[in-house]
Image: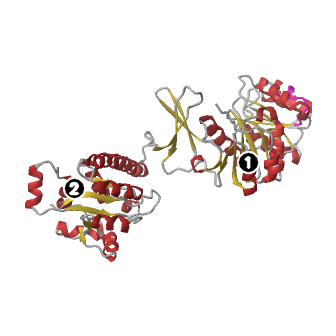
Amino acid sequence: MKKYALISVTDKTGLDRIAVRLSQLGFGIISTGGTAKILKSAGLEVIEAGELSGYGEMLGGRVKTLSPPIFAGILARRDNIEDMRELEEKKIPLIDIVICNLYKFDKDAPNREELIDIGGVSLIRAAAKNSRFVSALIDAGDYDGFISKLESADEKLLDVERKRLAVKAWAMIEEYDSRIASAFSDDSEKKIIRLSKHRSLRYGENPHQSADWWVLNGGHGLHEAVTKEGKELSYNNILDLSEAMALACDLGENAVAVIKHQNPCGAAKKKTVLESLQTAINSDSSSAYGGIVAINGLFDESLASILKGFFIEVIVARKFSEESLEILKKRKQLRVLEWPNPEFETFEMKSISGGVLTQTKDTKTVYLDEAELKVVSKREPTAEELSDLKIADTIAKHVKSNAIVLVKDGATVGIGAGQMNRSDSVKIAAMKAGERIQGSVMASDGFFPFSDGIENAAGVTAVIQPGGSIRDKEVISAADSLGIALCMTGVRHFKH
């Protein structure tokens, strides 16, 4: 029996090329609607799917391929005598190849029900089910490789290819159906999250741990950044990169963040990227050594000169000048990533025993909404202090709890991170700042349970914190006695 390929595609990429090659290899072509018109205009002989059913296309094109002759041609078991005899008796063509891709489903479209593909999914399912004999091609990227294997006439090679294509088809159908189910479901008790493997990593946090990088299907993020220089990113690099750019973007244009072990060791928001980078590095240069630098702006040759002789693992920026790349590529251990349009998911997940926890991302700061800020001390903060307080509060959101951040003139001068006792975080931040604590402002990610948090920050002139402690009055009294302007936001920023 003559063999046929059924072609019905929404994405017409590579359509002419594969149809011509199949025709040259002796395959008849069965097609539908617009696809058939294109193939006919290319000079190919095409059987319309509606001709096989005897009814043509029905319901304004809603029914094209859903007919017994087409599905019998796909599902017939080639090694079953009865199946083959029945096809021959009913003059049903044998369909060995199904080339099909689906309507683009948009959950927000007003007519989204009309975007649900029925015939295409059914064709692909049938071909994948009968993958011992039938090839299901859903991706134009597979066309050339498939044709070369078909031309080889190596049945073992083709068998492996058919199975690979079937697995790809099943995965696509699963993802497609789950998107539709999610769009129409109001069941808040179920959540479908689809991930695709971006790549395997050399190892995880430590060399004895295996690791992979997965991305959300249809999502945007760090995987879209372009590597300009350097070797493959490590697991720890990826965590720090995402955190560093998130902080730099939170602070705004020309901001710089330096991250180590997912904690900022320096951050600044100045008029120029050059000033921001200088002050962010100088905030705690010993901790910044071997860290990750994120630039919310252009990295040019003047910035490259600042980092000369200073060991940095990775630099990520929205854009790099060609001159800066020429300088940076001489640093053999440095990785350089360009991320023009950083985007971050609106939710977070953490694995626990037997499942995961999800939460919306912490996006709320007085940097974005000054209305949240309430002055509770006798003294009002100056305009300069208020500007620094907003920057400090934003940075504290990115520091592991308990977090204390000291900022002066738009840049950190001391950070106390991850201590079980908030007072200890204050002491660490003050120790990091040294003399620079004089005239600085302080942010805390949680309320001060006692007044010692403020009393141990000698030199600080203004403080921002959520408030909400049963001893708030004591804390306010301590601030007033020290002449400190104290602001409360009502917004906690714990980070674990």
Q: Position of residue 311 (x, y in %)?
A: 76, 37
Say which quarter of the image contains residue 5.
bottom left
Mark number displayed over residue 74: 2
Residue interval drawn in magenta: 453-461
Mark number displayed over residue 328: 1
Give the class, few, some or many, for how many residues have Cα within 10 Å of label 2's Cα (few <14, many ≥20): many
Q: Nearer the viewer, residue 358 or 217?
A: 217
Main structural element of the magenta stretch: helix, strand or loop? loop
> Of helix, strand and loop, which one carries label 2?
helix
Q: Position of residue 211 (x, y in %)?
A: 53, 33
Q: Position of residue 372 (x, y in %)?
A: 73, 45
- Residue 168, magenta (yes or no): no
| Left or right of 399 in this view: 5 | left
Q: Is residue 348 visible?
A: yes
For image coordinates 66% across by 33% down, the residue present is 495
Q: Is residue 321 visible?
A: no
